[in-house]
C-alpha cells in the first residue's frame, strides 16, 4: 500500500456527519490554498509572527530537489573510501523522519536519539573504519546531539581516524553549529530551510541527508510528495487533508482528545512514531490538543477497545474498529499529516508551530546537572520491592508490594485520562520494556502511551505539560553498568540521562500530575518483576 494514491476514509458514519460542516467551513475559508500560499494569518494574530517563519514545508517537494544530487555525490565519495555505515545523532524530527524513511526502504541507519550509555556504546562498537556520523541540529545546542558528537569525535581520533572527515552536519544557515562545523573542518555541512520547524522537516535536509546517505530513495520520496501536493492544496471537500482535519476536530469537540494509531498493512515502518511527534507537539498546548497513542496493531488494547475519548485511525486498510483510515505513499502521507495537523490547529484554536512547554524540562535537567549533589546522594526511595526502587511525587501512594503501588497509581488516573509510560532505558537491550504499554492499557482500561526517554521529550513532552491535564506518568530508570564520559563536559551520559528523567518528573509534578518512578537496580530482573506485578493488577 505504500505506493498507492492518497486517501482518507471516515469509516464511522456519525463522525462523518459531524465532520461535514467543519469541512465545508474550511473549504469556504480557502484554508488549504492559503496554507499552500504560506498565509500566516490562518491561526489568528497571536500566532502570526511564529507561523510567518514556519510554513516553507508546503513547497519542500520542489525546494529540496537540489539535495538529491549533493547527497548522492557525498555517498559515492564515502563509498569510494570504504565508508558505508551511517550513524545519525539527532533528536525529535531530526531522527524520527529518517528512521521511518530508511525503515520503509529497508536500508540500514543507526539512530542515536538517546542518552543511555549502553545504547551509545553499542553504536560505538560498530566498525568505525566504515562509519560516518551525521549530526543533525538546528542550532547545535541540543545537549544529547552535542554529547554524541563529542563522544564519536574522540572515538574516531582514538582509532586513528580523522574525525573531521567522518562528521557530516545538518543545521540551519548562520547557526552556531554551522560556524562550529566550519571551524572544525567537518566533511560537509548541509543547510536546511530555516523556515521549517523540526517536526515538519521530514522533506528538508534533516530528513533527506541521513536517509539518502544510508541508501534510501529520496528522489522517489519527493516525487510522492509532489504527486500529493495538488490535491492537498485544493479548496475542496475531497481534499484528504480537509477531510482528516475536520474528522479529528469534530471528534475532539465530542471529547475524543486522543488519536490511536495502528498500522493495517500500509507498508510504512514506524509511521506512528513520526506522526506522534507532529501531532502532540503541534496541538498539545493551552490545555487542549490531540494525544497520539501508537499501538502494536489493530488488535491491541487501546485500538480494539477504543472508548469515546479516542479516535481509532488505521494507517492502511479500514479494519474495524477504525473510525478513520488513511492510505498512500510515505511522501504523500508526510505532507498529508502536516497539512491536516496545521489545519486541525486552526479548528482547536491553537498555534501549531510553537512548543511553549518543551523548554521547561530542559531547564530542570540543566539545573540538576549544575547541582550534581542533588543527583548523587539526595535520593532515597520511599519503598523497595526486589530490584525495584519506588519513588513517588506528592500524593502518590508508594506503600506495599509493587503490585499494590501500581494498582493504586493506575486507579488515581481521572476518568478518560491516560497513562504515559516513559522508559529512560536502552531502546535495544531493554526493548522488552515496550511490552509494558499493552499490559498497562489492559490493566488500567485507559489509553496508554509508551515513550523512550529522552526521545519522547522532543515529541509528546509538549503535550504532557501543555495539553489536556489528565495524564499519570510512570517513569522507568535503570542502573548504569558501564557509563560513558562526555568529552569536555562535567557529566557522563548516565548522569545526563538521570538528570533528564528527574527534571521532567519535577516539571510534571509542578503541573500537579502524578509521577511514579521505578528505578531498576538490575534492568533485566526489574523489568521481569514489573511485568509480573502488573499481571497481579486487576483488569
Image (tube, rainbow, N blue to C red):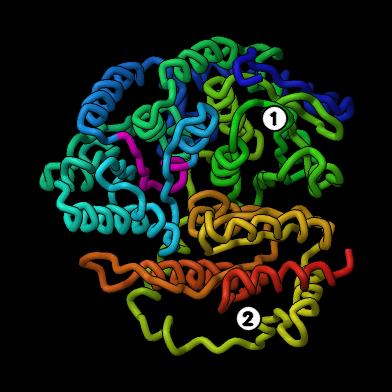
In-front residue for pair 317/27: 317
> Residue 218: x and y, percent?
42, 21
- Looking at the image, is 518 positioned above or below residue 265? below
Q: Position of residue 473 (x, y in %)?
A: 65, 65
Q: Is 494 drawn above or below residue 419 in the view shown?
A: below
**Residue 315: which numbered mark, if any?**
1
Spot occupied by residue 504 in the image (x, y as percentages of width and height): 52, 66
Report whether residue 350 is seen.
Answer: no
- Looking at the image, is mark 1 or mark 2 earlier in the sequence? 1
Boundaries of the magenta span:
84-95
Dot 1: within a 10 Å radius of its alpha carbon, few (fewer than 14), some, or many (20 or more) residues?
Answer: many
Q: Which mark is residue 387?
A: 2
Left or right relative to 495: residue 307: right
Residue located 51% across and 30% down the image = 106
The reply, left or right, for residue 250 in relation to residue 201 is: right
- Residues marked 1 and 2 touching at CB (< 8 Å): no
Secondary structure at numbered mark 1:
strand
Q: For the N terminus, which image quadrant?
A: top right
Tell me the CA gap for discs 1 and 2: 39 Å
Q: Quadrant of the C terminus?
A: bottom right
Q: Secondary structure at mark 2?
A: loop
Residue lying at 71% horizontally and 21% vertically, measured from the top left: 8
524, 314: nearer the viewer:
524
Within the magenta stretch, is there residue 88? yes
Closer to the camera in the image, 116 or 275:
116
Q: Is residue 211 covered in magenta?
A: no
Foreground label between 1 and 2: 2
Amino acid at each position: 500500500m505504500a505506493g498507492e494514491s492518497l486517501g482518507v476514509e471516515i469509516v464511522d458514519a456519525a463522525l462523518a456527519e459531524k465532520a461535514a460542516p467543519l469541512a465545508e467551513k474550511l473549504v469556504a475559508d480557502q484554508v488549504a490554498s492559503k496554507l499552500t500560499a504560506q498565509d500566516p494569518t490562518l491561526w489568528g494574530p497571536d500566532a502570526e509572527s511564529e507561523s510567518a517563519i514556519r510554513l516553507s514545508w508546503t513547497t519542500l517537494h520542489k525546494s529540496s530537489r537540489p539535495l538529491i544530487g549533493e547527497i548522492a555525490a557525498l555517498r559515492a565519495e564515502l563509498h569510494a573510501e570504504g565508508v558505508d555505515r551511517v550513524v545519525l545523532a539527532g533528536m525529535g524530527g531530526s531522527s524520527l523522519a529518517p528512521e521511518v524513511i530508511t525503515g520503509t526502504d529497508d536500508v540500514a541507519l543507526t539512530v542515536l536519539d538517546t542518552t543511555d550509555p549502553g545504547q551509545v556504546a553499542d553504536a560505538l562498537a560498530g566498525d568505525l573504519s566504515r562509519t560516518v556520523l551525521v549530526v543533525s541540529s538546528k542550532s547545535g545546542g541540543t545537549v544529547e546531539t552535542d554529547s554524541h558528537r563529542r563522544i564519536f569525535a574522540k572515538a574516531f581520533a582514538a582509532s586513528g581516524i580523522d574525525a573531521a572527515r567522518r562528521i557530516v552536519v545538518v543545521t540551519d544557515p548562520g547557526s552556531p553549529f554551522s560556524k562550529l562545523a566550519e571551524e572544525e573542518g567537518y566533511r560537509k555541512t548541509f543547510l536546511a530551510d530555516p523556515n521549517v520547524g523540526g517536526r515538519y522537516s521530514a522533506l528538508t535536509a534533516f530528513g533527506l541527508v541521513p536517509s539518502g546517505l544510508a541508501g534510501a530513495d529520496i528522489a522517489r520520496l519527493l516525487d510522492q510528495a509532489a504527486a500529493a501536493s495538488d490535491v492537498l492544496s485544493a479548496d475542496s471537500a475531497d481534499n484528504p487533508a480537509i477531510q482528516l482535519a475536520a474528522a479529528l476536530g469534530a471528534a475532539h469537540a465530542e471529547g475524543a482528545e486522543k488519536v490511536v494509531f495502528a498500522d493495517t498493512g500500509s507498508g510504512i515502518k514506524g509511521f506512528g512514531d513520526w506522526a506522534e511527534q507532529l501531532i502532540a507537539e503541534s496541538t498539545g498546548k493551552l490545555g487542549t490538543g490531540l494525544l497520539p497513542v501508537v499501538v502494536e496493531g489493530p488488535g491491541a488494547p487501546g485500538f480494539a477497545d477504543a472508548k469515546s475519548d479516542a479516535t481509532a485511525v488505521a494507517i492502511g486498510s479500514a479494519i474495524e474498529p477504525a473510525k478513520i483510515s488513511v492510505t498512500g505513499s510515505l511522501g504523500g502521507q508526510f505532507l498529508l499529516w502536516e497539512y491536516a495537523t496545521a489545519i486541525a490547529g486552526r479548528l482547536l484554536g491553537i498555534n501549531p508551530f510553537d512548543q511553549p512547554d518543551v523548554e521547561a524540562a530542559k531547564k530542570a535537567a540543566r539545573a540538576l546537572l549544575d547541582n550534581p549533589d542533588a543527583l548523587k546522594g539526595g535520593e532515597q526511595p520511599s519503598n523497595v520491592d526486589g530490584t525495584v526502587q519506588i519513588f513517588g511525587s506528592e500524593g502518590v501512594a508508594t506503600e506495599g508490594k509493587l503490585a499494590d503501588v501500581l494498582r493504586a497509581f493506575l486507579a488515581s488516573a481521572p476518568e478518560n485520562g491516560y497513562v504515559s509510560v516513559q522508559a529512560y532505558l536502552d531502546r535495544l537491550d531493554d526493548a522488552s520494556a515496550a511490552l509494558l504499554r499493552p499490559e498497562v492499557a489492559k490493566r488500567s482500561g485507559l489509553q496508554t502511551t509508551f515513550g523512550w526517554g529522552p526521545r519522547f521529550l522532543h515529541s509528546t513532552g509538549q503535550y504532557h505539560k501543555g495539553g489536556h491535564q489528565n495524564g499519570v506518568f510512570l517513569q522507568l530508570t535503570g542502573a548504569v553498568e558501564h557509563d560513558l564520559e562526555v568529552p569536555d563536559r562535567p557529566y557522563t551520559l548516565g548522569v545526563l540521562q538521570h538528570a533528564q528523567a528527574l527534571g521532567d518528573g519535577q516539571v510534571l509534578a509542578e503541573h500537579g500530575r502524578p509521577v511514579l518512578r521505578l528505578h531498576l537496580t538490575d534492568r533485566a530482573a526489574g523489568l521481569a518483576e514489573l511485568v509480573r506485578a502488573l499481571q497481579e493488577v486487576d483488569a
